[in-house]
């Protein structure tokens, strides 16, 4: 397991704060209230461990399949439905949404091989990520991948109530590879996929997707 580069500043700041609070607690609290001091230390260690865990990149055997759309992130499948596309496309699409809790790995990966033909950041709200309107009203970053077959898939990195920063590494014109990093979202969020209607969905609501591994659909 390695740590993602997006976590460097957060981990550094957390480390400094942890050391300062521990030192102050040891000096002022420990002599008079040792039990309270150790409760505080344990709580700090748990929080620090969660922060480290949030930026982890676990070792995995990624699924490489040019006929498949691979899960762009870890999380639970919360939406599978036919929708009127509200961005880039002018037709109906199948939307598959994956919700990421703060405990999930938060690296986002390219679901297919292809060319980036659309890359757009949208300012917005911070509704809870499972809210039905979060897909269209929350802060989000959208990419459209054009596969060599000519088919296209749109991804939306969507901020949630806790997510305050979306990072996206793609640019229009980039030739990207399946499962390479698309970006990162900090602290709880979701990713939507908008797929062609003839895509064969390979997951169901409630399934736990593994980013870079789970086959969401085939085309």
Image (spheres, rainbow, N blue to C red):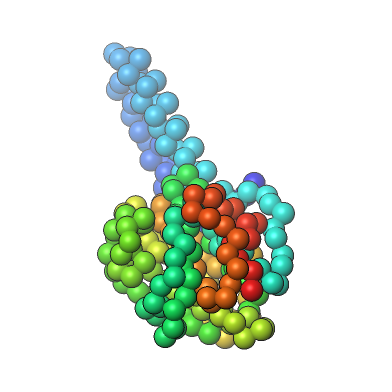
- Above or below — where is 86 with respect to 80? below
Quarter of the image where the C terminus is located: bottom right
* Residue 92, image x, y percentages: 44, 79
Locate residue 115 relative to residue 94 in the image: left or right: right
141 or 208: nearer the viewer: 208
* Residue 16, image x, y percentages: 42, 42
* Residue 115, image x, y percentages: 60, 82
Locate residue 122 relative to residue 56 in the image: left or right: left
30 or 186: nearer the viewer: 186
* Residue 108, image x, y percentages: 54, 62
- Above or below — where is 108 with respect to 91? above
> Which residue sits at x=44%, y=48%?
101
Q: Is residue 18 visible?
A: yes
Locate residue 61 relative to residue 101 in the image: left or right: right
> Which residue sits at x=72%, y=54%?
61
- Above or below — where is 136 with respect to 34? below
**In the picture, residue 41 is in which quadrant?**
top left
200 or 45: nearer the viewer: 200
Q: Is residue 105 visible?
A: no
> Which residue sits at x=36%, y=66%?
135
> Which residue sits at x=48%, y=57%?
98
**In the picture, residue 15 is in which quadrant?**
top left
Circle count: 0
């Amino acid at each position: 397991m390695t740590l993602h580069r997006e976590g460097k500043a957060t981990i550094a700041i957390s480390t400094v704060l942890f050391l300062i609070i521990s030192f102050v607690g040891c000096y002022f609290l420990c002599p008079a209230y040792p039990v309270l001091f150790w409760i505080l230390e344990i709580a700090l260690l748990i929080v620090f461990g969660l922060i480290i865990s949030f930026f982890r990149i676990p070792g995995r055997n990624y699924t490489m399949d040019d006929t498949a759309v691979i899960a762009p992130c870890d999380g639970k499948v919360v939406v599978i439905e036919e929708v009127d596309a509200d961005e880039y496309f002018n037709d109906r699409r199948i939307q598959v949404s994956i919700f990421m809790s703060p405990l999930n790995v938060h690296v986002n990966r390219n679901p297919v091989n292809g060319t980036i033909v659309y890359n757009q950041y949208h300012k917005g709200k911070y509704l809870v990520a499972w809210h039905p309107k979060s897909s269209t009203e929350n802060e989000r970053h959208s990419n459209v991948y054009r596969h060599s077959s000519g088919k296209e898939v749109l991804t939306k990195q969507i901020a949630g109530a806790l997510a305050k920063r979306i990072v996206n590494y793609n640019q229009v014109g980039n030739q990207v590879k399946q499962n390479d990093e698309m970006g990162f979202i900090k602290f709880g969020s979701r990713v939507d996929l908008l797929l062609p209607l003839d895509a064969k969905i390979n997951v169901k609501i409630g399934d736990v997707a593994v980013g870079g591994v789970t086959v969401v659909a085939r085309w």
